[in-house]
Image: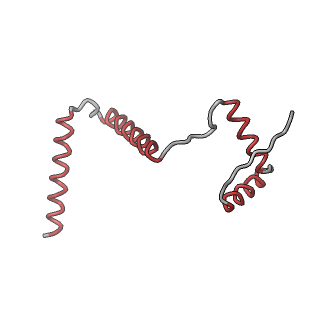
Amino acid sequence: MAQTAFTVRMDSDVKRQFDELCKDFGMSSNTAFNVFARTVIKQQSIPFEVESERQAIIRRGWEAAEIIRQQAAENGTGDMTLDEINEVIKKCREERRQRKNNNVQ
């Protein structure tokens, strides 16, 4: 198989750290890039998750919502209406204000 050169520009400190880590893995950075390229070809995708910070925030929000949904189902409150939920929130806020006022006085 014919060989070809591939040049990558990166921060010198990142390169140093990458070279050291690859050495710990028992391979060169050249071998690591070849492994990466072959994996991308085989899987037809990047072999790790790549997402923007905005997308990460959205994903964590959905994960949190799913946890809350599961907890509500376990607690028997999964069928509460929005009005009922808002009433519980209102009561919690009132109790918090009362506790805060009692601590101040």
Residue 39 left/right relative to 2 = left
Question: At x 19% / y 41%, what residue is drawn?
Answer: 86
Residue 50 left/right relative to 36 = left
Question: At x 70% / y 35%, what residue is drawn?
Answer: 39
- Colour scheme shown: secondary structure
Query: Of all residues shown, which one is farthest toward the bottom?
Result: 105
Q: Is residue 28 above or below residue 71?
A: below
Nearer the observer, 24 or 70:
24
Question: At x 14% / y 64%, what residue is drawn?
Answer: 101
Across and down, in percent, residue 82 comes to: 21, 34
Q: Is residue 23 above or below residue 82?
A: below
Nearer the observer, 61 or 8:
8
Quadrant that contains the C terminus: bottom left
Residue 34 left/right relative to 76 = right
Quadrant that contains the N terminus: top right
Name the quadrant containing residue 62.
top left
Nearer the observer, 69 or 2:
2
Across and down, in percent, residue 33 comes to: 73, 44
Across and down, in percent, residue 11 comes to: 65, 59
Nearer the observer, 79 or 28:
28
